[in-house]
Amino acid sequence: MSNADIFVGEIIGTAILVLFGAGVCAAVTLRHSKARASGWVVIAFGWGFGVLAGAYTAAPLSGGQLNPAVTIGIAVDTGTWDKVWVYLLGQTVGAMLGAVLAYLVYLAQFQANVRTEDSADEPTPTLGIFSTIPEIRNPVANLITEIIATIALVLPVLAFGLTKGLGESGTTVLIVSLLVVGIGLSLGGPTGYAINPARDLGPRIVHAFLPIPNKGTSDWGYAWVPVAGPLIGGALAGLIYNAAF
């Protein structure tokens, strides 16, 4: 795969991933959305379907990694680092693009995110639509959560490559998508399961610049956790896989 194919593929695939993911968070969170308050299970499946659509779309061009933690895990395992920067750049740009697209889909809902005379509700905080926010702000505990959750993603992803039938049938991406749903349901409660630095950082940057009414802070003091945790987890998963398999 050429650098151009990888870059374009990762932009497209990650944009689709974040469009679905930020989109489902907006659907559940924002007032005047038909899916408002439909819950965590809906969010987990929305992100999983985002992985499904994004990875299948990007696979012919880039392999559909869509996640710096996965890219780092593969590089640690194989020792091949020359194209890592292309993957990471494409993933970050794609995540930013996907966040902008999700914003445009829910533009009317974002613009209505104000307190009106006929509603006593306070404006809805919007950062959680784009990036993760911990339920209990404890950087050490939050970092540990993200590391473990990312290992639970990347180690199986690497191991799936050993399962010949999955590759031949083309169902590897489907299984990974269900894995993401499972991680969301089981491990997502403490931090919102970033498990993907680009997925968190790109939309957080976009959130900082978009003209969203009452959007609040972009919480840059916490932003390092969902970047460092998944990167560490991805590297550890690569080391574990290399040693055990």
Image: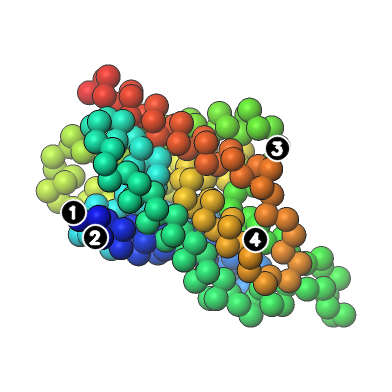
Estimate the spatial distance between the alpha carbons at disc 1 and disc 2, rounded to whole Å.
6 Å
**Could you say which disc has been placed on residue 1 in the image?**
1
* Marks 1 and 2 in Cβ contact (< 8 Å): yes
Q: Secondary structure at mark 4?
A: helix
Is 223 in front, or is 53? 223
Disc 3 residue crowd, few under 14, some 14–19, many 20+, Cα 10 Å: few
Image x and y of residue 119, in percent? 83, 75
Query: Which residue in the structure is indicated by mark 2?
Result: 5
Image quadrant in which the C terminus is located: top left
Q: Secondary structure at mark 3?
A: loop
Q: Earlier in the sequence, mark 2 or mark 4?
A: 2
Dot 4 amino acid type: Ala
In the image shown, does 62 or 22 lie closer to the viewer?
A: 62
Residue behind mark 3? 136
> Can residue 141 be seen?
yes
Q: Which residue is mark 4?
A: 208
The mark that comes first in sequence, 3 or 1, is 1
Q: Amino acid at mark 1?
A: Met
Q: Is residue 43 above or below residue 183?
A: below
**Residue 162, quarter of the rendered image:** top left
Separation (CA) of disc 3 from disc 4: 23 Å
Check whether the beta carbons of the residues at disc 2 and disc 3 lie within 8 A of each other. no
Q: Nearer the viewer, mark 3 or mark 1?
A: 1
Q: Nearer the viewer, residue 17 or 185?
A: 17
Q: Choose the circle earlier in sequence order: 3 or 4.
A: 3
Q: Earlier in the sequence, mark 1 or mark 4?
A: 1
Camera-nearest label, 2 or 3: 2
**Residue at (68%, 70%) from the top-left corner?**
212
